[in-house]
Amino acid sequence: MQKGAEEEAQVDPPEEVESGEGAASLGDQEPEGFTFFSDHPLLTFLLKRLGWMALTLWIVFTLSFFLMRSIPGGPFDQEQNLSAEVLAKYKAAFYLDKPLAEQYLLHLRNALTGDLGPSYKMADYTVNEIMAAGIPKSLALGVIALIFALTLGITAGLLSAIKRGGFLDRSLMTVATIGIALPNFVIAGILILLFVIWIPIFPAATWGDYKHLFLPAFCLGAPFAAYVARLTRTGMLDVLSQDYIRTARAKGLSDAQVLVRHALKGGLLPVISFLGPAIAGILTGSLVVEKIFQIPGLGTHFVQAAINRDYTLAMGCVLLYTTLVYVMNLLVDIGYTIIDPRVKLE
Amino acid sequence: MRRDRNRNLFALGLALLLLGGGVLALQGATVERADFTFNNASEPQSLDPKVVSGVPEGRVLRCLYEGLTNMHPKTLVPVPGMAERWEVSEDGRTYTFHIRKNARWSNGDPLTAEDFVYSWRRFLDPAMPAKYAQLLWLVVKGRDFFDGKVPSAEVGIRAPEPHTFVVELVHPTAYFLDLCSFYPLFPVHRATVEAHPKTWSKPRNFVGNGPFLLEARTIRDRIRLRKNPQYWDADSVRLNTVDILPVEDHVTGLNLYLTGVLDWETDVPQQVISDLLKRDDFQPRAYLGSYFYRINLKHRNPEKARFLSDPRFRMALYLAMDRKAIVEGVTKAGELPSRALVPPGIPNYSDARHQPPALPEMDMEKARALIEEVKKDLGVDKIPTLKVLYNTSESHKNIAEVIQQRWGQGLGLKIKLENQEWGTYQASQKALDYDISRSAWIGDYADANTFLDLFVSGGGNNHTGYADPIYDSLIEAAAREADRDKRREILYKAEEMLLRDLPIIPIYSYVTKNLVRPWVKGFYPNLQNVHPLKFVWIDEEAKKNAEGR
Amino acid sequence: MSELSETVLDVQNLRVTFRSEDGDVRAVRGVSYELARGETLAIVGESGSGKSVTHMALMDLLPQTAMISADRLRLVGRNLMEMSPKEKRRMRGSDLAMIFQDPMTSLNPFSTLGTQIAEMLKLHRGLRGKALYAAAVAALAEVGIPNAEDRVEQYPHEFSGGMRQRAMIAMMLAGEPEVLIADEPTTALDVTVQAQIMELLAGLQSERGMSIILITHDLGLVAGSSHRVAVMYAGRIVEMGTTEKIFADPRHPYTRGLLASVPRLDQEGGELYQIPGTPPDLAHLEPGCPFRERCEFAV
Ligand SMILES: Nc1ncnc2c1ncn2[C@@H]1O[C@H](COP(=O)(O)OP(=O)(O)O)[C@@H](O)[C@H]1O
Ligand SMILES: [Mg+2]
């Protein structure tokens, strides 16, 4: 007992004893957490992270550059009927005949000026043009998928947590378990059968109006929705058993108020932490989904670039993916500190 | 309090941002359906005839451009295109084309012989030649110009008059008029190419001379074509708009066809072929392509080389291959088992009236005997394990398994299967880094030469190590021969040699796998699977009836 | 006792049973007491004796598995047993408030104390805007938190333990309750702070004239701060009386045990007395006195 009290005394700053000291320690605590406008912490945080991003991009660039070229086959090697003489001229035109180190420096210099060169396999376009055309489509797909994942996942998770142990809870969690286990091409197959062939309400594939986005975004988002549902449920159950929820109820708040004002933030923290991996997963998952639904986004370009040994385009996609994942994670990290005041930007 | 409010506002802001992104994402425009939509199965490498080398590119380019000659939609024989007529000299080496007076570019400029001179020289340009540049080495001094040895003016391509285009060939070339309709040799609009060296093939700049205009193109999404009113034969073009989709996945393509998006799908997934065969709109026909296995005659491993370089061993492999089981059990679309490299149906070679050389039927006994003979001669009892290489695909795998079974149980060989992803597989094949490798060849034109030419010594697509000066001289002689019958006999000899030496093991010849809606007219089956959209039209009556049902 | 006349809380024969798969846990087995206005009633007893459950039952904070029954439950003349869930909710925080043992975990870590206090002021006093803000600041100041204007913008983790409990008190008193249930309010705090909190509660009580139920297992805390003491054991009040009487003349052997186990300043060295054995299993109580097994006087 005595020992415990000592510990408590150490943890507690002396502000208990005298009000004056308590006031003095206030100053130290002020810059904690997330404050607005005056914010040097955010700025330094951003600068630091951007620095890391630049370094990461350079490493990714270098690794991809040499890895790609270490795989057998080159962009012009695999075409039937290309005579040796023609091939030599094409390789020369794209520096492919130069020593690797020289190629590396050339490409790095161009990349630094933002020029990723022409696509080797889609000769009518530069890599920048191809990516500029692909980004909005992949982002549209990703955003809708994320909205699906979050709205469906959080709703299901909340319902499950509130009706814990009940029929609704059990059925929702069964669906979620299946959703996590099913790869998205299987989900795609089922949905196409249901909503394209049997009940033709959605187009089978290709890019166009909003209807074209629905099925692919759902397929892409479904496994994440399932995961979010589980995270929300466990998060909410965890929070609902917390003392501060009892406090909130003791205050005389209604169940809904307790849920929205007191339980939600804490309950959704696991979901927020999952957003980083989820966004990365949605971006990479779109490789498969874009192929199935013939969406001309980055995923399709990336896969084809890899198959075709389209070095420049593949490099562009790798760099873009790295940037996207990095920036999204940055946003998620900032988002986390917004929800949880105990976490600071570092 | 304030801090809470700020946090909440910020979180709300992020959520709204996400939602706003969602709303923006849903703003895609509705695409109005074209008169005719087909799946081209891949994004064209380019719309520049110089850069292209594949079947999908051909389908697009034949809409946007027109060569000196056209292919007849049924028989594929050369018919007038930009040239309304032509003369061939006695010796078969000089072609004089008369460009039609009403030939125009899509911007209204007249199209003259000069345009062809420019385009064909550009095709051979030593600095940046066409991928198929060797096609025009058959023109006098073509090769020298390509090598940078002579100026362009010396090449045997001339325009003595604005509408007269003269080509001088090194040898009389039997298939030259067919070549003139081959898409890499289409003309390009000089002024546009020179004004926009990098962007001339974009819709905003594009000028062509074909039946259709390039209206819009979005990468890996669609190419929208519109009828070209300047086209000399615009009156016979009946489609106003055409959409070309680059759907790589044929399951997706099939879904699009089944839901009415596509009028023509150019290939189908292997696993549904048996079901599709019950439909009226799926009718596979003979196609100018061969499926065969290459054998590495120059294997680096001496153990393996001893066997692989022995023609009797290769013959044993051939004899022990159950081609019937493959076409009936695996490919299923009516492919024909092959006993030769050149597929059937090539006019004046393997058509109904001619009998090209062929190998005997499957014969396990003989095969076993040959193996024993080889073993005895080499004084070896054990044959090293051989690997069959194929590029990753379900049907290649299934075919290889049938073969593995025969060679394994039937001949007592140890066979392993190895799959590689496309690029790696191509590289392995090129580097002769394989034992036995799955291969295929689709003819560029309906002539046996496109197949037999593959295996000349050091040929760019030989990939077997086969090198025989006699074979080379036969191919060469055939190229020089102007007489059709004599030429055929020479080529027969060449193929006979090839079938004797067997650097390749024939398996089957391809069939086309088009799915075409019944109301699509002017679409004729043919050996090269070429279907110029110029002749295609929609029978609205039939369409209405079919849809009403 | 004369000034403590009006009864604000009247509990008669309160029983709480938890349904569970291993049988029913009879956590409260007939608790009765009356609480007068301005009075402080200390509820003491070992951990597990049912102190918290009794009062959570009054607050209607128990989970669905709890079966509550009583002969009478009245709060300032209103019958708690006839209240609708909505009325009970309104009663919480405004008539009957409760503070909890661990101020560390009992405050919402995700919002500022200002917001958490303002929530009460809004809900029970209908304050809005500037008045709300001012009241929140005032509430913090009232419980002795310095720099209240800045402190309203701070999160619980930016407070020390004692300050947090003060904030908790400020929050729970914001609804101006008739009765404050303080469930082990100082157990998690260090000794000097304990005294300050008790002092604060006493001060607030005399200002507002509210009644306090002080739940504790620490008889030492009770001596100076409560008028009456109720000793609970195994879900029952085994002895109740004025503080002086209980300390001077405990009747029940359990009370004696409890008193013997209080550390005293005048006691030199030696081991503290401990009641032998453990509290009975409330799921399987046998008839008769549940203290029998541990009782020095049992035959
Ligand atoms: N939710 C519950 N379900 C089952 N038993 C409970 C529950 N809450 C408390 N109990 C039991 O009720 C008894 C009284 O607990 P409590 O009132 O918390 O004791 P204390 O006197 O220490 O506050 C204990 O035996 C405890 O195990
Ligand atoms: Mg307790």
Image: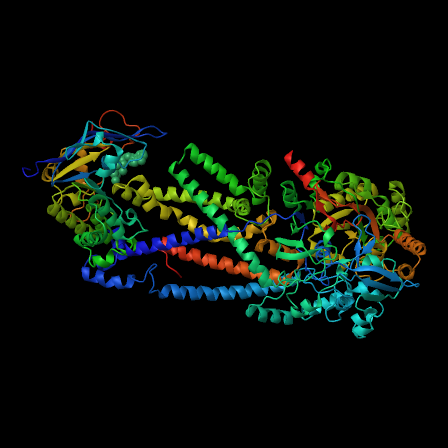
Q: Position of residue A331 (x, y in %)?
A: 43, 57
* Residue in front for this viewpoint, B63 or B267: B63
Where residue B240 sits in the image (x, y, percent)?
A: 66, 51
Q: Residue furthest top?
A: C287
Q: Is residue C158 left or right of residue A97?
A: left
The vertical placement of C214 against C142, above or below, is: above
Image quadrant containing the N terminus of chain C? top left
Is residue C56 among the parts visible in the rendering?
no
Quadrant holding the C terminus of chain C: top left
Q: Which of the pair B108/B25 is nearer the observer?
A: B108
Residue A131: quarter of image:
bottom right
Q: Is residue B367 left or right of residue B215?
A: right
Q: Residue at the spot x=48%, y=36% of the render? A: A174
Q: Is residue A46 above or below residue B441?
A: below
Q: Position of residue B164 (x, y in %)?
A: 82, 66
Ligand 1 picture quarter: top left
Q: Please, which residue is most extreme toward the left here?
A: C2
In the depicted view, which residue is nearer to us: C105 or B522?
A: B522
